[in-house]
Image (spheres, rainbow, N blue to C red):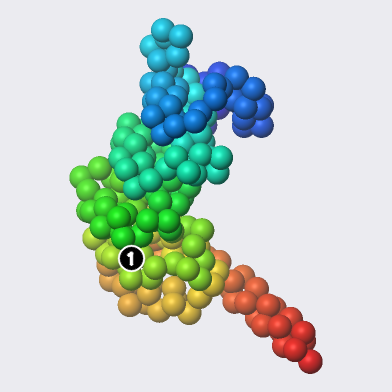
Amino acid sequence: MRAYMKSELPFLGIAATARRRVARALLPPIESQEQLYAVVRGLWHGRTKGRVRVYREERYVAMELLTHARFRHLRDPATLELCAELIVDGAWWDFVDHLAKHGVGELLKRFPEEIHGEVLRWSRDSDKWKRRAAILCQLDRKQSTDLALLDAVIAPNLSHEDFFIRKAIGWALRQYGWVDPDYVERYVALHADALSPLSAREALKSLGSARAKLDKQATQRRSGQR
């Protein structure tokens, strides 16, 4: 696991299902935002029972706790600061992608006025992982995707040379392509001179399947109306 993730942190070697089962059984009750943040930071930094060593699975538990539906009522716009802390410190795609989609993305959905400007600032941040998070935070929005925001967070990163940024651009466009493949095709054509080959390839790879799926759905709707 450590070799696959190219991780400097050690692994305990616990699979996700077992990890979540253990977390449910052993974690203390969490009833306030202060408690939630304390448990998350304790697990993240390995500060449990006096230890100062941290395993990667502990960080997985920490970020899954922070974004768990059970604690939705304990999250507010200020939670974005903790997401940023974990993203910058974690500095790898497994942490960043979860926190982008389930952390930043959820906050953007619930508190758009408070979070929108921060996401824009992240897209220009000196930290590349905050940039990646800004690009990926709308992955599950489908028809509700804020296209103006998506375009705005991709724009300052079109010429970015980092692999993870380029991959994120392609992924974000490909994901939206499942609901509007024509938009993605036009976008790639319009930005052909600036978009990296990796981003363009990733963005376009599923458009045929997306169109087939949309055509099938349209046919089923027409059949249901008869």
Give the left or right position of residue 105, taking residue 13 as reference.
Answer: left
Q: Nearer the viewer, residue 111 or 22?
A: 111
Give the left or right position of residue 15, taking residue 72 as reference.
Answer: right
Which residue is tagged 1?
149
Where is residue 192? Give x, y as percent. 33, 72
Q: Residue at x 49, y 30 (%)?
A: 31
What amino acid type is highlighted by mark number 1? Leu
Q: Nearer the viewer, residue 134 or 2?
A: 134
Q: Quadrant of residue 216?
A: bottom right
- Residue extending farthest to the top is 50
Where is residue 184? Give x, y as percent. 44, 73
Where is residue 193? Give x, y as percent. 28, 71
Q: Residue at x 48, y 43 (%)?
A: 73
Q: Quadrant of residue 179?
A: bottom right
Give the left or right position of residue 64, taking residue 82 as reference.
Answer: right
Q: Residue at x 49, y 62 (%)?
A: 141
Where is residue 32? Give x, y as percent. 44, 32
Q: Quadrant of the N terminus?
A: top right
Q: Nearer the viewer, residue 11 or 139?
A: 139
Q: Is there any visible trace of residue 177 in the rendered image?
A: no
Q: Residue at x 43, y 27 (%)?
A: 35
